Amino acid sequence: MAVNDVARVYANSLFEIAKEKNVLEQVEKEFKAVSEIATEEDDFRRYLNAPGITIEDKKKFLDKVFGGKISEYIVNLLKLLIDNGRQTSIADIYEAFVEYNDNAHNRQRITVISQSSLDSSLLDKIKSEVGKKFGKEIIITEQVDASILGGIIIKIGDIVIDGSLAKGLKNIRSNLLNSKVRSELAYED
């Protein structure tokens, strides 16, 4: 998902504060949990977006839910988002924050999609080879998708390496449909 510029501004501010206070990993972990709640919990999302609830009531709600459980940096960010009407951007801001943190720690996140779960030795080999290519520590997210039939698809940022059987069959089909066979070669007496 492409992250918008507004999300990057908030994420960069949070990143710089967390870096200065030496709490980057803690903030990322807490922000991930909050982002998941904001994405998956309909009631939470509806409450934050409800026009009939005052900004002050929403902030009190955040204090009640998160106060003392997560860092003040995340709580203050959420309150700022409420103040500015940007509470729908929590997931985008988290994604941008992770990008900043990964860049600072020379990490690259990739997604490996296969028909079935891959064994750890193959994942380690993928991690090693991609790591050599990009000169970064690789963090793999594995996804299983039975529709690819076999092989793997690797997504690295905007780059997609499609080595799936489904893609290969689609290419063969396309080539067959697009090829022109001369009739005298096709029919011999």
Image: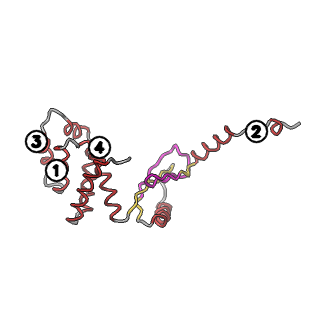
Horizontally, residue 15 falls left or right of residue 114, namely: left
Residue at point 21% right, 65% down? 20
Mark toward the start of the polypeptide (4 vs 2)? 4
For mark 4, what is the residue? 39
Categorize mark 3 by other alpha carbons within 10 Å: few (<14), some (14-19), many (20+): few
CB of mark 2 within 8 Å of CB of mark 3?
no
Categorize mark 1 by other alpha carbons within 10 Å: few (<14), some (14-19), many (20+): some
For label 1, the SS is helix
Closest to the camera, between mark 3 and mark 4, is: 3
Q: What stretch is highlighted in magenta?
A: 140-161
Q: Which mark is residue 181?
A: 2
Mark toward the start of the polypeptide (2 vs 3)? 3
Mark toward the start of the polypeptide (1 vs 2)? 1
Disc 1 marks a residue whose amino acid type is Phe
CB of mark 1 within 8 Å of CB of mark 2?
no
Disc 2 marks a residue whose amino acid type is Val
Does 3 appear above or below 48? below
Alpha carbon distance from label 4 to label 1: 16 Å
For label 3, the SS is helix
Horizontally, residue 147 falls left or right of residue 67, namely: right
Closest to the camera, between mark 3 and mark 1, is: 3
Alpha carbon distance from label 1 to label 2: 68 Å
Horizontally, residue 161 falls left or right of residue 172, namely: left
Give residue 135's position: percent from left, percent from top.
44, 67
* Residue occupying the far right of the picture: 189
Alpha carbon distance from label 3 to label 4: 22 Å
Give residue 127's position: percent from left, percent from top.
46, 63
For mark 1, what is the residue? 66
CB of mark 3 within 8 Å of CB of mark 4?
no
Disc 3 marks a residue whose amino acid type is Glu
Categorize mark 4 by other alpha carbons within 10 Å: few (<14), some (14-19), many (20+): some
